[in-house]
Amino acid sequence: MRPGPLRQVRLVLGLGVRRWLNRVASGFAAKLGARGAAAVVRPPTARRRISSGAVMALFLIGAVFQVGFSMWMFGQRAAAVDGRPPVRDSTWASARSTAAAAEPGWQQRVREQLAGDRAMRELPEELRDQMLTAAVTLLATPAVADADEVLHRRIAHLTAALLAMVAVCAVILPLGMANTDLAKPDWDELWLAAQPVSDRVLFTARLVQYTLLGVLVWMAVPAAVAVLAISNGASWQAGVGLGLVAGLAWAVTAAAIRLVIEIWLRQHLAHARIKNLQAGCTVLGMAAMVAMYGAAMGYGPLPGWFLDWAGLLPWSWLPSGWASVAALQPEWRLPLVVGGLAIAAAAAVTAVQLCTAWSSGGLIAHDGTLNGARQGPPGRWRPMRVLGKDLLLLRRDRALLVQALVMPLFMIALQLVLNPTLAATAVSGFHAAVTSAVALGGWVLVSATMALAFEGQALWILAGAPQPLAHAIRGKVVMWAIFATGYAVAGLVVITTLLPWPGATALADIVMVLTGLPLLAVLAVGIGAAATDPQSTQPNRRVGPGSVYLYMLVMGLFSLTVNRGSAHQRLAMLVLLAVIAWALWQRLRDRLAYLFEPIDRPPRQVDLADGAWAAFAFLVLQGLIAVLLLALEVEPATSIVGAFALAGGITALATLLTLWRSRVPQLLTAVGLRPPPGTSVLRTVVTGLVAGGAAAVFAGGYLTTIGWLAPRLPALHEMLEQAGDHPMGVTGWHMVALAVVLAPLCEEFIFRGLLFRGLRRDLPLVWAAAASAAVFAIIHPSLGVIPVFGLGLACALAYARTGWLLAPIVAHALYNGVVVLLSGG
Amino acid sequence: MTAPILVVAGLGKRYGDVGAVDGLNLTVEAGTILALLGPNGAGKTTTIRMLIGQLRPSAGTATVAGLDCFARRDAVMAITGYLPDEPVFHDYLTGRELLGFVGGLHGLDAAGIRDRAEPLLERLELGPAIDDYAVNYSRGMKKKLALVMALLHRPRLLILDEPANGLDPYAARALLALVREEAVSGVTVLFSTHLLEQAERISDRAAILAQGRLVAEGGIAELRQRAAAGGSLEEVFFAVTRADGTAEPA
């Protein structure tokens, strides 16, 4: 027997809800880092379903609390429009009575009363002062006394304006690019339509599904309305009840509108058009969303643009605003609740009727939906590389275009519009403006993390090309580097026309932009490609979600250095970026050969990433341990030497352990700790002595030159003075232990055994030596950079010649010994 | 007669505990058409994916013209054309642009691509659709386009995964005739299929896989002889795959 219509709706609905839950659960699981052998997408296990359910529940509770708190603050802030500061009602009432008493000096007492409120204490001092002055002026006018009625009406109106923004988001965002089903040729609804159920059942089920899963509405509206009602005198039962009813009415209405729009689009537009429209919806929805956040979050008075928006329409008379009126004015509650529910019911019925009527001639009426609508221009034969193909795709796929090139502009513009302080800072001077240009370029590169994933299932074409995949991806790096640098340069051009040219220092800024952004492009594409899993059939799991955050972290560090760093720090940042980018590509190249391998991983070798990690860990550990030892009141010199030894030892052991566990073949020989067979100790030592002697002679010459130049060049003299101001306090035997024993042992292992070895995989000898020496030099104080570079070069060459770390250790010890002797111990 | 172009020695692939291919030995001489037969799950696609360097063998080696398929994937692909079972193309690229793209990756210039592609497109009756977006093609057209892409750089070895799978008789005939012609002009062809009649019609030799092992290999005539006088490849297929105690007859 065929099930009745209600049961049919339940069946279809159950399918949709289960599918949504599974998708969200797997999304959460991916975010939780539970990425297993991802070759096959498996349904979530019972355990994972429970854990991701718990995470979802926590997330929802957190969101509801967040919304509740923001709404409470919003109510306070809405009350402050006429100069009333955002204080609690009780505080305001007592301030009002103080003012009404009008005893001498009441102004000062009012200020104290108001300033004691928690909301005021959290404000910046300058703003608080302004508000207090405004409040005193306000309280001096007698009409304020009976403002409660007026006040409630104002809050209701402003809340209604805010809720109207939520309404826009709730309808538009689900139509945006995240809705991957809408523009798919094989639409889900088509398959369902082949089942023995009527259109009416399908649409009803879909409507209920949208109602239940309208997360945005359920998160925002009930909490907002409930808090508003309770904080203005309603009992909590009435408040929560009202919130839930409002949520239901809203969710149903938004679902009905969304359903009608979706079905109409599918009926009338080719899916390429729908995709373009979706791009527009995303932009609009994001704008509404950010505007909503901008209005609802924060302290202090409501922003001016929001008050303008609120003044645009009588929001509290529109259905979306009824909830706020009902929350604040009890006498309106019953009629508005009944009216709201009636409207929702009418919307639902109308939506199902309309959709059923539209699809009486089949679900797809538009004849061009499946075929012919997407036709390219008649073309000529033209060979294309990856760069050309990607540019072409970007030009045609508007969704991609919007996401990649419009969103960054939009994000920056919105930040500036919503945060006037930031806008003022960003154009306060050339240097600050350059930071904004870097941020703009950096934002563009967020999309670059998707570069490999853009290929989607057409990746087999690239994988079958007669080049390593890494070469193909290079084209993508070039494209994104051009975009990012282009945006930043355009920003710079605008800046230079608007702001006074600060002279030569600007050149350093420009160099940072022009070198840093291409490096960031390499990193962004590399990070994304390394996290891409072509085996995954689920789009939301094809790129590991951590990659975007990781990229943003690097980008943030870079922007910070551009903004705040000294010349030396900026140079160090560039070198660091270059090393990380290179290290990443080395790993990536190994991995890309195994991209389609579900089980095997590339065999491990010592690579640049090991060297970069070790150098980083060594520096950070040194600082941490030194601070710890000093805190334990160990003598400073001993602390420094001890920290160095401990950091070196821990780093070396941890690195060796990691490499051993990942089964690097012949590990000790690979990192230079064991000599290659047939190595003579004597020859190794002599090579080391020659290299160290040469470096020492070079350093001596350099120091003599500096000493001769210093009295003649005031700038240099100043630099030397500054350098001399920071003695490490390490002398005598401590110095000898540090310079002649510990430094050679630790640093040679890290910089020659790992870093140089990793660089040597890709570079000819001299270049690898120079690059490792550059990194080695850049972590030393600025005065020593040049002689230490010479030492690094000599050590790398000595190591390359002998294959045993003993040679560079001897060289380093000799060099440091000479330097310690010359500088007088 | 001629040197073997494809040499597979002791090739094996395990996915964790599951063995997909085990101890496969094959030698394919230049200019022959070899059919890789076997029931579903026999390891045909895994074998092919090792030959085009997408999977790393767990054991043994596979070489094309002396080049290791995995370690020298790029060099191997420069002389190999590959047709996947279900080719997927980029949204928003026309057939012509896709051919331009593949030609560009192979270092061909516009004239080189045109001279090679146009006759092939005409043969396969794909000409009128060449300026449509390839995502809109029917399944048969997609497969034809992918075949032209695979042949564009005049490969010495052609690897086809289920070439006629899901095609109508016209499309299948056009596609297979083209493959046959390529073989006559000296291209070596390896194709997987579960359509025995097709293998019998176009291939010179056949290798039958069952549960990841090679259970029979030889010239078509030779294999027929093995079943019984005047037997068909089908009989051999059922005999060897069932004798192995593994697969149900399809």
Image: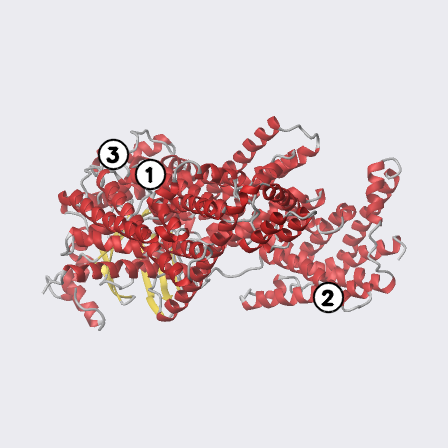
| Image point (41%, 49%), residue name | A453
> Residue A470's spot in the image, x, y percent?
47, 47
SS for dot 2:
helix
Q: Are marks 1 and 2 on the same chain?
A: yes
**Host chain of mark 1:** A
Identify the amino acid type marked 3: Pro
Residue B124, given in percent of the width and then of the height, sits at: 21, 39
Query: What residue do we see at 21% from left, 46% from top?
Result: A350
The residue lying at 78 percent from left, 62 percent from top is A640
Q: Is residue B136 left or right of residue A655?
A: left
Residue at left offset 29%, top offset 46%: A258
Q: Chain of mark 2?
A: A
Q: CA distance from mark 1 to mark 2?
A: 58 Å
Residue B187 appears in the picture as rendered: no
Q: Is residue A267 left or right of residue A176?
A: left
Whether residue B37 appears in this view of the structure is yes
Q: Nearer the viewer, residue A484 or A750?
A: A484
**In the image, is residue A685 above or below residue A703?**
below
- State the residue position of label 3: B119
Q: Secondary structure at mark 3?
A: helix
Q: CA distance from mark 2 to mark 3?
A: 76 Å
Q: Report the disc number at residue A277.
A: 1
Residue type at mark 2: give it.
Answer: Leu
Residue annotated with mark 2: A628
| Residue B194 image point, x, y percent | 20, 58
How packed mark 3 is, by other alpha carbons closer than 10 Å (few <14, some 14-19, many 20 or more), is: few
Residue B72, percent from left and from top:
44, 52
| Whether marks 3 and 1 lie on the same chain | no
